[in-house]
Amino acid sequence: MEDRLLVTIQTKSFGEMEVSEKQKISFPEGILGFEFIKEYYLLDMDDSPFYCLQAAEERHIAFILIQPDFFMDDYKLMISEGDLSALGIKDPDEILDFAIVTIPERTEDMTANLQGPVVINRSTLEARQIISLHESYTVRHPILAALQARESGGG
């Protein structure tokens, strides 16, 4: 525990906070539309299935993330060998994947981008947003509808 270097960051939603350097995720190619930002911090959101991906140097840039298997029993990450290689992933256990969440005015209409998941190498903490090879995934998959279908036994 004493090995953890804490840094103070400015966040969009939580103001100033201390985080561990071990929460820093590097995106060498950035995220689509935000290619100029290479460093983020992955923050837990207390008692929630959501995470915050906060830009390290840009307080006003943050993404809400969710792990797709939280709301989809049959979720399957399908990515190219090139993406795996670029991230240095040799073992499936090294993969941590998230979907970027869009929260509109009506929060019950929130969606997850399953077509462009964020994939992180757990060992190196290097990440990239990739294009899913799964043909039925969309950029606006309804989260609450999927949860309701799962709870009712429909998926």
Image: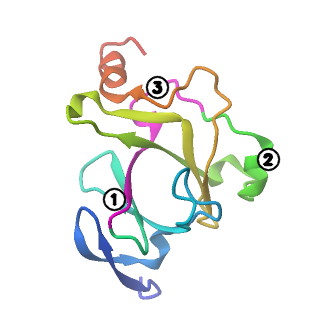
Label pair 3/1, CB-CB below 8 angstroms: no
Secondary structure of residue under mark 3: loop
User: Residue 5, located in which quarter of the rendered image?
Assistant: bottom left
Q: How many marks?
A: 3
**Residue underneath mark 3:** 73
Q: Residues within 10 Å of mark 2 (few under 14, many from 20)?
A: few
User: Residue 132, located in which quarter of the rendered image?
Assistant: top right
Sequence-wise first label, 2 or 3: 3
**Membership of 70 in magenta stretch:** yes
**Residue underneath mark 1:** 44
Q: x, y percentage for residue 26?
A: 57, 67
Label pair 2/1, CB-CB below 8 angstroms: no
The answer for how far apart the CA atoms under marks 2 and 1 are is 29 Å
Left or right of 151? Residue 34 is: right
Sequence-wise first label, 3 or 1: 1
Find the magenta span and give its range: 60-76
Q: Nearer the viewer, residue 98 or 103?
A: 103
What amino acid does circle 1 point to? Asp
The answer to whether residue 66 is above or below residue 141 is: below
Mark on residue 82?
A: 2
Residue drawn at x 49%, y 31% as measured from the top left = 139
Q: What color scheme is it?
A: rainbow
The answer for how far apart the CA atoms under marks 2 and 3 are is 26 Å
User: Residue 77, located in which quarter of the rendered image?
Assistant: top right
Q: x, y percentage for residue 16?
A: 25, 76
Check the picture and name the quadrant holding the N terminus: bottom left
Mark on residue 72?
A: none
In front of the other: label 3 or label 1?
A: 1
Q: x, y percentage for residue 137?
A: 55, 25
What amino acid does circle 3 point to? Asp
